Image: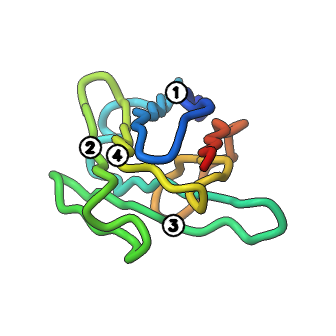
Amino acid sequence: VRLVESGGGLVQAGGSLRLSCKASGMITSVFNPSGWGWYSQAPGKQRELVASITSPSSTRYADSVKGRFTISRDNARKMVYLQMNNLKPEDTAVYYCNDLKESLTWGQGTQVTVSS
C-alpha cells in the first residue's frame, strides 16, 4: 500500500486548499472500515493529528482547525480529503494522511505554505 498526498501549495492567509490522499494498492474491504486521519508537521515540530474520520463518517478536529477544515472520504475511490478554508500562516506544514493506527508507511506528504 502506498499513500499519495496531493493538493498542497502556496496560498495567502484567508485562502483555501483541498488536499487529497489516495491509498494506492489497498483493497476496499480494508480501506472502508478503517479510520483515517490528516496529520501536519510544521518545521521543527512533531507530526500531529489535525483531523480524523471513522467509518462511516464520524469526524473530529484539533481545536486549532475546528470550523475551518473539513475531512471527508470516498470509499469507492479509496480517497481521503481535507478541505482547508480560512488558512492561517500557522497552518504552514507538510500534511500527511494515514490510518488512525498510523500503521502504514508514511507518504511523501504535501507542503502547505500560507503567507501573511
Q: Residue at x 59, y 47 (%)?
A: 96
Identify the residue under disc 3: 49
Labels 4 & 3 near each other (Cβ < 8 A): no
| Mark earlier in primary sequence (3, 2) | 3
Residue wearing tag 4: 85
Q: Which mark is residue 7?
A: 1
- Residue depicted at 63% across the width and 52% down the height: 92
Mark 1 to mark 2 CA distance (whole Å): 15 Å
Question: What is the secondary structure assignment of the residue under circle 2?
Answer: strand
Spatial separation of the CA atoms under disc 3 and disc 2 = 15 Å
Q: Nearer the viewer, mark 3 or mark 1?
A: 1
Residue 43 in picture, x, y percent from top left = 80, 60
Count every numbered label the image shows and give the total: 4
Q: Amino acid at mark 1?
A: Gly
Do the numbered discs 4 and 2 sit on residues whose CB atoms are within 8 Å? Answer: no
**x, y (%) of residue 72?**
26, 43
The disc, 4 or 3, on the residue closer to the chain's N-terminal end is 3
Q: Which mark is residue 72?
A: 2
For the residue pair 110 and 23, the one nearer the viewer reads as: 110
Q: Position of residue 70 (x, y in %)?
A: 28, 50
Of marks 1 and 2, the one in the foreground? 1
Element type where label 1 sits in the image:
loop
Q: Name the one closer to the observer, 45 or 4.
A: 45
Residue 102 tag number: none
Q: Earlier in the sequence, mark 4 or mark 1?
A: 1
Element type where label 3 sits in the image: strand
What is the CA distance from the residue labelled 4 to the residue labelled 3? Answer: 17 Å
